[in-house]
Amino acid sequence: MTRFLTILGATGSIGRSTADVVLAHRDELRVEAVVGGRDALALADVARRLGAKFAALADERGGEALRQALSGTGIESGAGQTAVLEAAEREADIVLAAISGTAGLAPTHAALKAGRRIALANKESLVCAGDAFMADARRVGAEIMPVDSEHNALDQALAAGLNRDVEKAIITATGGPFRNAPREQIARADAKEASAHPVWSMGSKINIDSATLMNKGLELIEAHHLFGLEPERLDVLVHPEAIVHGLVQWSDGAITAGLALPDMKVPIANALRENRRLRMELPRLDLAAIGRLSFERPDEGRFPCLSLAKAALRAGGAMPTILNAANEIAVEAYLAGAIGFYDISEIVEKVCSTLSGRQILMPSTVAEALAIDQEARATARRLIPAPVEASKLR
């Protein structure tokens, strides 16, 4: 049976990998709409290759360039947030949500419809508005399927038992580019050094989150909402080989683990499958050739962002929303050269402390979450010590 797919974030790394999966299964998957950020030509190219019916660019300024690039193809186009929401709401069986950051929350939420699957790669939807988002998904009967390699591995591993028998669900981290670096070296690192991820090819913001280990903290918050597991039943292990993506330790002492080569097409194919797995012509995992898998505990002294995220998860309420907003502003400032590496965690900690007494309730709607997000961003901007171009601090 043919299923129709909309891709939010079609020009990013997840979107490009999704296109590869779709092209390998044209008999089963058709593309309804694609959404991109600023690159009109890249979006037009992916729309043509996938045979999309509609293409939407978030940046209004690129609307005319997109229209011209699609001239004669029969593919409709639009630009701006209205067009993005139109794409998210068009008829489709699956919406792959891969717009990075809080910008992906509104269109991902708009995509929630009865009987629809949301293949979720936008972790901010759950970090910023987890309770509200999941409640709305249950209310309309939308299925949430994780795309992140860690959560997809956990989703498969958790199928081996019942949630009540889970002692610990563990996601893994490569440790990033500074896994073995002393604190003094990390403190001097510029954005280029911090972006040099040893395994994955990702966007600049996610690369920095991986270097600070904030990404793993956000993934713990996401796992809490996806799987209904309390903070004390969630953990992180550093695993530099990036072969084991998630592990579940059971009450009888057994462990079920999800293993795969570090290729996002593997979890994407799993998230898009229906009654059977999609066959992918990818290299197979050869454990004998790899020879050894290693694990270690993360050093939260050198990577304090992980501790801050764990604290936000334990605190609950609006604290994860505040944490994420402050981190996005701090990372943008770091990428712009306005602050140092450890200033990211210091700014996040200050914002969380400043707003801790006023934002104690979990946002009950996505609109409430976005309002808290904006307040936290404003607070973080005031802590940036050097002037930064306003457009870089959204």
Image (cartoon, grey):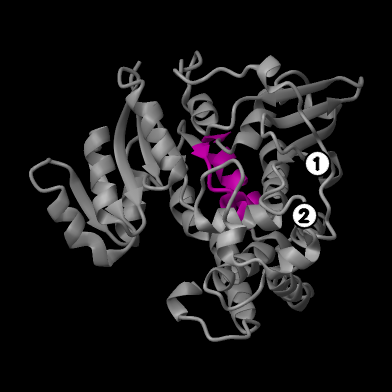
How many callouts does the rendering have?
2
Q: CA distance from mark 2 to mark 1?
A: 10 Å
Vertical placement of residue 245 versus 87, above or below: above
Residue kind at label 2, given as amino acid type: Leu
In the rendered structure, the answer to whether residue 203 lies left or right of residue 342 reads left
- The residue stretch that appears in magenta: 119-146
Label 1 neighbourhood size at 10 Å, few (<14), some (14-19), many (20+)? many
Which residue is pictured at 23% across the width and 34% down the height? 51
> Quadrant location of the N terminus?
top left
Residue kind at label 1, given as amino acid type: Leu
Which residue is pictured at 50% across the width and 31% down the height? 268
Q: Earlier in the sequence, mark 2 or mark 1?
A: 1
* Percent position of residue 87, x then y: 32, 47
* Percent position of residue 92, x then y: 35, 34
In the rendered image, the residue lying farthest to the right is 252
The one of 288 and 55 positioned closer to us in this rendering:
288
Vertical placement of residue 7 versus 292, above or below: below
In the rendered structure, the answer to whether residue 226 lies left or right of residue 101 reads right
Place residue 163 in its image quadrant. top right
Check residue 141 for magenta coloring: yes
Check residue 203 for magenta coloring: no
Label 2 neighbourhood size at 10 Å, few (<14), some (14-19), many (20+)? many
Which residue is pictured at 69% across the width and 25% down the height? 258
In the rendered structure, the answer to whether residue 228 lies left or right of residue 32 reads right
Place residue 343 in its image quadrant. bottom right
The answer to whether the residues at label 2 and label 1 have Cβ atoms under 8 Å apart is: yes
Identify the mark at residue 234; answer none if there is no mark.
1
Report helix, strand or loop for mark 1. Answer: strand
Q: Which residue is mark 2?
A: 313
Vertical placement of residue 210 versus 261, above or below: below
Identify the mark at residue 101; answer none if there is no mark.
none
Report helix, strand or loop for mark 2. Answer: helix
